[in-house]
Amino acid sequence: MTARGGRAVQAILLRHGQVAHHRSDVGLTDLGVAQSEAAGRWFAEQGVEIESLLSGETARTLDTTTAFAAGYRGVADSPELPDPAVSFALRNPDLYLGGHRVNIAEGAEAIAAQAPGIGPQDVVRSPFFGELISAEERVGYWLEHPNPPGEDAHAVARRIVSFVRSLADGAGRAGATIVAITHSPVLRAVRLGFENVYTREPPFLHGFSLIAGQTGDISFSLFETDTGDIPATAKPGPGFEES
């Protein structure tokens, strides 16, 4: 990893910090905040100049960028860091139920709560969502489904590729590094698209580096942050649902 200097634009896509569950839009746990701050400190200690710090719209991604920025700025002589901003491209897959966009969640009640006028029994009767809520690994069920009601994994991967290519638009962006905080389904779809590899959940604050060259080609590689003695894979216990 290098700071600004080359012609290509580097997008580092990271998973958010730890949350207690995904039954609703909750913020980070205390450990999730510590993970995010540690990752920010590590980037600053490497001297990485971050042109943009972006996130999705969920509480967990917003909390992650806030803590990441605090950790980054807390390092003496750290490079200047712009305030975090939301990017629509970093959202979870677009899935639809009863005309409403819903996120992958644990249980019929959690999914129905996202769709006004839809009850848990409607979720159970839905061919896609009925199977999803009983799947051993919900994100994996979506990844492998040939025709979900909305974006499939390949559509999400194409969305992220378009987003990364667009980062070079505008004066002064060549050689920039952008850190983007997103979700497990997005990261897993991207890896499936580039390497045709099915993986389970990436650790928190880990992900991929996508480098867009001047010709529009994109190179892909795994990316791991160093959070020191703060575990990146710890789970908060029963009821935890990853995404």
Image: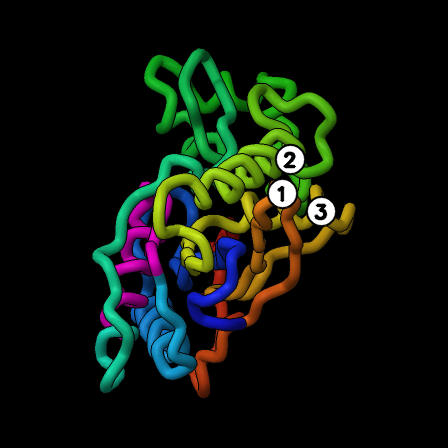
Q: In the rendered structure, does residue 233 fall within the stretch colored magenta?
A: no
Give the residue at the far right of this rendering: 196
Real-space Cα separation, disc 3 to disc 2, in angstroms: 11 Å
Name the residue: 35% across, 72% down.
40
Is residue 31 visible to the viewer in this orientation of the structure?
Answer: no
Residue 153's disc number: 2
Q: Which mark is in front, 1 or 3?
A: 1
Foreground mark, 3 or 2, reads 3
Amino acid on which disc 2 is placed: Ala
Q: How many other residues sit within 10 Å of disc 1, few (<14), some (14-19) or many (≥20)? A: few
Q: How many marks?
A: 3
Q: Secondary structure under badge 3? A: helix
Q: Label 1 amino acid?
A: Thr
Q: Is residue 216 left or right of residue 14?
A: right
Q: Residue at x 44, y 79 (%)?
A: 227
Contact between labelled residues 2 and 3, with CB atoms less than 8 Å apart:
no
The span picked out in magenta is 51-71
User: Along the polypeptide, which appears first: circle 1 or circle 3?
Assistant: 3
Q: Is residue 108 among the parts visible in the rendering?
A: yes
Secondary structure, magenta segment, majority class: helix
- Quarter holding residue 211: bottom right
Q: Which mark is residue 85?
A: none
Q: CA distance from mark 2 to mark 1?
A: 25 Å
Q: Check disc 1 and report the residue beneath it.
A: 215
The first of marks 3 and 2 along the sequence is 2
Alpha carbon distance from label 1 to label 3: 17 Å
Earlier along the polypeptide chain: callout 2 or callout 1?
2
